[in-house]
Image (spheres, rainbow, N blue to C red):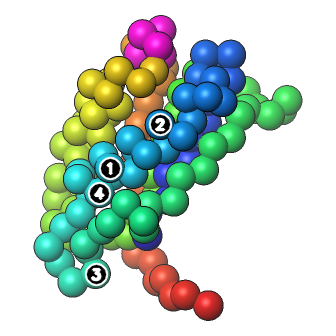
């Protein structure tokens, strides 16, 4: 179950944009991070998206930071940079966000880790 944490400048990426942004990120993550290895398939219902705003003590933050935390699979790790680029391109091509978001220090960062998951 990948976790997507979106840190945003609320003056540029407003609350009314968030539902569409969450849905779009779920679709993109499923498309670009799913793998054929056992346990590597994904559905949009498995992609958790959380939004946050920079706090008063945060420094050097961007208007948009998308961090994706996902389980490590060898086929996912083999081309994680390409997958990250495709996620970034999908966000740009969605046209959901204002043009001033793109360029500068805004980014997508994909973290892969060996992890376990279980429902309670």
At 56% from the left and 48% from the top, the residue drawn is 5
Label whose residue precedes the other's in the sequence (3 or 4): 4
The N terminus lies in which quarter of the figure?
A: bottom left
What is the number of the mark on residue 27? 1
Q: Is residue 40 visible?
A: yes
The image shows residue 50, relative to residue 75, as above or below, that is above
Side of 41 where 6 appears, left or right: right
Magenta stretch encompasses residue 51: no
The residue labelled by disc 3 is 39
The image shows residue 7, relative to residue 9, as above or below, that is below
Disc 3 vs disc 4: Cβ atoms closer than 8 Å?
A: no
Residue 9 position in % (x across, y down):
65, 23
The residue labelled by disc 2 is 21
At 28% from the left and 81% from the top, the residue drawn is 39
Number of residues whose C-alpha sits closer than 10 Å to that of mark 3, classed few (under 14), some (14–19) or many (20 or more): few
SS state under label 3: loop
Residue 80 position in % (x across, y down):
24, 51
Alpha carbon of mark 3 to alpha carbon of mark 4: how far? 13 Å
What stretch of residues is rendered in magenta? 98-102
Residue 81 position in % (x across, y down):
24, 44
């Amino acid at each position: 179950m990948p976790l997507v944490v979106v840190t945003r400048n609320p003056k540029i990426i407003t609350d009314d944009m968030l539902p569409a942004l969450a849905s779009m990120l779920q679709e993109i993550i499923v498309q670009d991070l799913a793998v054929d290895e056992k346990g590597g398939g994904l559905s949009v219902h498995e992609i958790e998206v959380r939004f946050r705003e920079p706090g008063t003590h945060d420094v050097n933050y961007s208007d948009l930071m998308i961090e994706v935390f996902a389980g490590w699979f060898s086929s996912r790790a083999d081309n994680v940079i390409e997958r990250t680029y495709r996620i970034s391109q999908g966000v740009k091509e969605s046209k959901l966000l204002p043009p001033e978001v793109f360029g500068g220090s805004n980014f997508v960062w994909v973290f892969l880790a060996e992890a376990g998951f279980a429902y309670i």
